Amino acid sequence: MLVRFGRSVVDAMPQREYDAQDDVWRELDEDVRAIWAAEHDARVALTLAAACFAAGACITRCYVQIAAPDGEQGERVVKTYSFGRAAYLADCVPVAKDLESMDMDDMPCKRVLEAYESTAPETIEPAEVHARPRDDHRTLPPALRDLLLADTADELEVMEEDDDPYVARVVELREQAKVDRTGAFEGFSRLVEELEAKCAVAELLATGPVQTQFCDNQLVRMVLPVLEEDRSVRILRAPDALYFAQHEICSFYADQEDFERSLPEVRHLYDLARSSMQSHFALINVLARLERFDEIIEVARHGLRIASDRSAIGYLFYRLAFAYWNCDQLDLALACYRLVPRGEESGSSALEEMQGLMNEMGVSEPPTFEEAVETIHKAGLELPPVSAVTNQLADAAVQLVDNGFFFLARGCIFQMWRTMGNDELGSLNRSLG
């Protein structure tokens, strides 16, 4: 691990020192303040090294660098210390315990750290810790296997190769659909059959229980295990082209307003991508056209169990509110309208519909945020992102960082930062880049 901090400036050091013996304050000259600044930097370096080793038992060596401003480069490293865990515990920790009683004029910490001065390392960690999952074939430790339902890092890849021939066929069929929708529909149907057969073979060849699922981004893949109780299950990645082709089939029927025929197809899409918000939205839209509001409630509630994105949460609450309204559960409908985040795409429509509902209920003021949360809690709903999702992301982030899977960890930490707005999480996210 490497950590870098800015060098202390002399002007930041105290200008006067209290003399307890004579009970007076004495001015400090420039040389003394410079000594204090150097000693202060050494003590900060010693403290940061402790933080590095405390970050995880797998950290066996750390580098602490002191940087100074540089007009052209932004900053330049003026000092590098290299610490091994064993030597740090044996030699540096005892010194750290006594520093409070040591005079800074004698620079005790700086003198100790002279033995740890080093040149800047060319690399801190192997390149594989920053590799995309498809290029990372390392075996996951047991705890991560159970947490993420995968045995190796490459099983967590969600992106298709750029030159995938099946995706190319989807692109060709989309172009064909502009002039020959029926022919393109038949092509999409054949493509789905072909890819489903490939998935079935992969499932049959698996040595343990598996599920084939499509995840439209890395975060969705990390959250997917929340929906699975059996920790022995492993997730097989559904081809992008399978999801895209199935989506085109759903759109074909929807464009013809043949929603009865579209429904089984969109249910199939939903089953293929249980943790994807887009599959939830697609099913909800078809159910809404068929006025099957009880089923909308079921799907929207399922989506809220795994949603962590603000816009997705807003849309699900918006759809849930209208469904509850049509099922004569007016208090629940009003609470859901109130919980649609302001500023989101569905926010203005939610406000307009909420006013209509309030007029119907004879209510002049909407519930407070706290009252709305209490109402959905009574109905068995938790305000998203729910604890199962936040715990999943937090556990994954910690274990992925500790075990050197930085690319995957960044996705978890970035989402936690977006949700919580925590500056420390933002800094951690940047440090893993």
Image: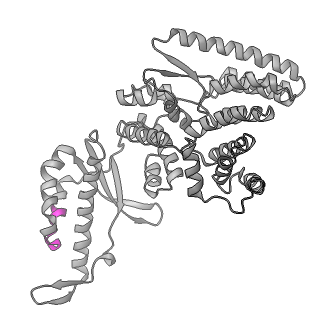
- 278 or 202: which is nearer to us? 278
Residue 432 pos. (x, y %): 44, 46
- 74 or 304: which is nearer to us? 304
Q: Which residues are magenta?
A: 102-111
Q: At 14% from the left edge and 72% from the top edge, which residue is drawn?
A: 103
Q: Is residue 266 left or right of residue 149?
A: right
The majority secondary structure of the magenta stretch comes to: helix
- Asked if 22 appears above or below 144 in the picture, the reply is below
| Residue 244 covered by magenta stretch | no
Residue 1 pos. (x, y %): 33, 46
Is any atom of residue 35 visible in this view? yes
**Colouring scheme applied when the structure was drawn:** one colour
Q: What is the total number of numbered labels drawn onto the structure image? A: 0
Which residue is the extreme one toward the left?
21
| Residue 106 covered by magenta stretch | yes
Is any atom of residue 384 visible in this view? no
Q: At 25% from the left edge and 68% from the top edge, which residue is drawn?
A: 40
- Asked if 20 appears above or below 173 in the picture, the reply is below
Residue 188 pos. (x, y %): 77, 19
Q: At 59% from the left edge and 35% from the top edge, which residue is drawn?
A: 217
Image-quadrant location for residue 122: top left
Q: Is residue 66 left or right of residue 413?
A: left
- Asked if 311 appears above or below 364 in the picture, the reply is above
- 100 or 38: which is nearer to us? 100
Residue 228 pos. (x, y %): 49, 27
Which residue is the extreme one toward the right?
179
Image-quadrant location for residue 60: top left
Q: At 49% from the left edge and 40% from the top edge, which residue is drawn?
A: 389
Image-quadrant location for residue 305: top right
